[in-house]
Image (tube, helix red, strand yellow):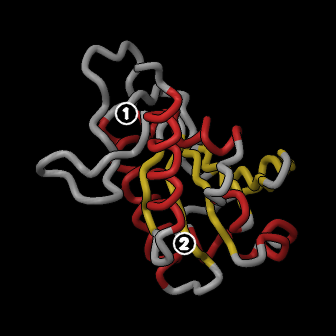
Amino acid sequence: MISEPPAPGRQPGEVPPIEAGAASAPDPARRAEVAAVLDDVRQWAQRTPPVLGIALVGSWARGTPTTRSDVDLVLVLAAPGHLAHATDWLSDVLPHRAPRVVRTARWGPLRERRVRLAGGLDVEFGLVPPSWAATTPVDAGTARVVREGLVVLHDPAGLFERLVAAVAGADRTSRPP
């Protein structure tokens, strides 16, 4: 599922509705908490110039979250190293939510900071350099993330817009006639 223009009545960056019939869909309180977290992240990004783009990925981006789903974010940063080694920025991103780091890991170019909020929601920040969103060529792992669901939350430089278009174009040209 590649990010597409929002459906009528939805704003760019708005989380898709949860698929009907999901057996363990999050309750309205959890959905509201996720929406508030995404708003906090957007506001922080708008006042933080090293943030080149932010996208929601994973089950929340696909509209298939469960009660146990975390919030997966990809942050394209001019220099991801600083945020990967510091923790003070997390309270700036999620004020009044008491984020506590529960895991730090590295997956290729992605540096993960997973935090647990006071209400039990986990938020994973995947910190990546601009090269992660390169379009010539698109990395296979990056293309998989895009195909599996991506909602652009902040993209002042158009990095995600170009990435989504490149993956969609590659998919069209690789299909047999």
Q: Earlier in the sequence, mark 2 or mark 1?
A: 1
Point 39% across, 59% down: residue: 36
Image coordinates of residue 113 in percent, x first then y, are 75, 55
Q: Amino acid at mark 2?
A: Pro
Q: Is residue 132 left or right of residue 177?
A: right
Image coordinates of residue 46 in percent, x first then y, are 47, 81
Q: Which mark is residue 95?
A: 2
Quadrant position of residue 134: bottom right
Q: Nearer the viewer, residue 20 or 174?
A: 174
Q: Is residue 159 left or right of residue 9?
A: right
| Residue 71 versus residue 45 in the image, above or below | above
Q: Residues within 10 Å of mark 2 (few under 14, many from 20)?
A: some
Quarter of the figure with the N terminus = top left
Which residue is disc 1 drawn over?
A: 63
Q: Amino acid at mark 1?
A: Gly
| Residue 22 versus residue 7 in the image, above or below | above
Determine whether the residue tagged by mark 1 lies in a helix, strand or loop.
loop
| Residue 108 versus residue 92 in the image, above or below | above
Q: Nearer the viewer, residue 174 or 1?
A: 174
Image coordinates of residue 167 in percent, x first then y, are 52, 44
Image coordinates of residue 82 in percent, x first then y, are 83, 76
Quadrant position of residue 80: bottom right
Quarter of the figure with the C terminus = top left
Q: Which mark is residue 116?
A: none
Q: Residues within 10 Å of mark 1 (few under 14, many from 20)?
A: some
Q: CA distance from mark 2 to mark 1?
A: 26 Å
Q: Nearer the viewer, residue 103 or 29?
A: 103
Point 51% across, 51% down: residue: 166
| Residue 25 versus residue 43 in the image, above or below | above
Point 55% across, 28% down: residue: 68
Determine whether the residue tagged by mark 2 lies in a helix, strand or loop.
loop
